[in-house]
Amino acid sequence: MRVCSLLLSTARGRDPASMLRSLAPGLSNGPVPLAPADTWRVRILLVDDEERMVAALRRGLAAEGFVVESATDGTAGLQLAQHGDFDAVVLDVMLPGLSGYEVVRRLRARSNWVPVLMLSAKDGEYDQADALDDGADDYLTKPFSFVVLLARIRALLRRGAGARPAILSAGDVQLDPASREVWVDGAPANLTPREFVLLEYLIRNAGRVVGKAELLDHVWANAADVAPNAVEVYVGYLRRKIGSDRLITVRGVGYRLAA
């Protein structure tokens, strides 16, 4: 994964303002706004496996007055986030151990609503939608500006850590990506992991006809190795659990989940 092109300078002896000017040339002719003086009370958890980025961001955030702790894998990051008293978490998506998606899902499943800003070189719309649906509060793609990162963190801190569960719904079918729970007309439905992913994709596209090839691409990681009738089989399984009238077959085209 490419290291952020606008990382803080590693040169010693440089004051925070000059370091920020090197990151954002457009600010070189004017004053650089720093964080409020009381940021020493704000604790930030940084989880990223790029050690150079972690070191640079730790220096930059510390220079702004934040108290920073860090982890370089998802498992350690989850442990720290669960048991540390953090005001915000900056979390990479692609991590050893547990992905950033899984970390934020597990936090939300435990009703931990610490504000989470996810970082990733993945800039696809579904990548960002997955992160936000899983419970992240914001998403920033790499490479990024340190000035923008600071602004995003300050915005999260202003919002606070109120409970903001992300529940997807289509009609009377509800799905919680964080807790991996599904309800149909208020009653819980027990889905297998594959059925859950299939339903999640259909809910995100509720009311639209979704073709078999599209489902293979987004629900199965290795579509080339999947049997041709896999979609039909799992659609049948899903219908038995959510009701056949909610998942409609459009002959020769695909499937549509009633919105």
Image (cartoon, helix red, strand yellow):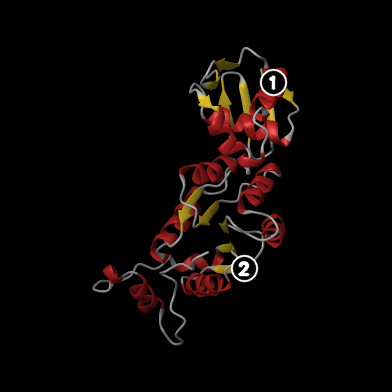
Write down the quadrant of residue 227 in the picture.
Answer: top right
Rendered position, 109 above or below 14:
above
Q: Looking at the image, can residue 97 be seen?
A: yes
Q: Is residue 91 above or below residue 229?
A: below
- Outermost residue toward the bottom in this view: 13
Q: Which residue is mark 2?
A: 69
Mark 1 surroundings within 10 Å by alpha-carbon count, few (fewer than 14), some (14 through 19), many (20 or more): some
Mark 2 residue crowding within 10 angstroms, few (<14) / some (14–19) / many (20+): some
- Residue at point 67% right, 15% down? 243
Q: What kind of residue is marked 2?
A: Glu
Vertical position of residue 169 compared to residue 72: above or below: above
| In the image: residue 23, left or right of residue 52 | left
Can you identify the residue that label 1 sits on?
236
Residue 186 appearing in the image: no
What is the x, y in percent for residue 174?
Answer: 62, 26
212 and 154: which is toward the camera: 212
Q: Quadrant of residue 247?
A: top right
Judged from the image, the secondary structure of the residue bearing numbered disc 2 is: strand
Separation of disc 1 and disc 2 at Cα?
Answer: 47 Å
Which residue extends farthest top? 245
Image x and y of residue 95, in percent = 63, 59
Give residue 12's position: percent from left, percent from top. Answer: 46, 87
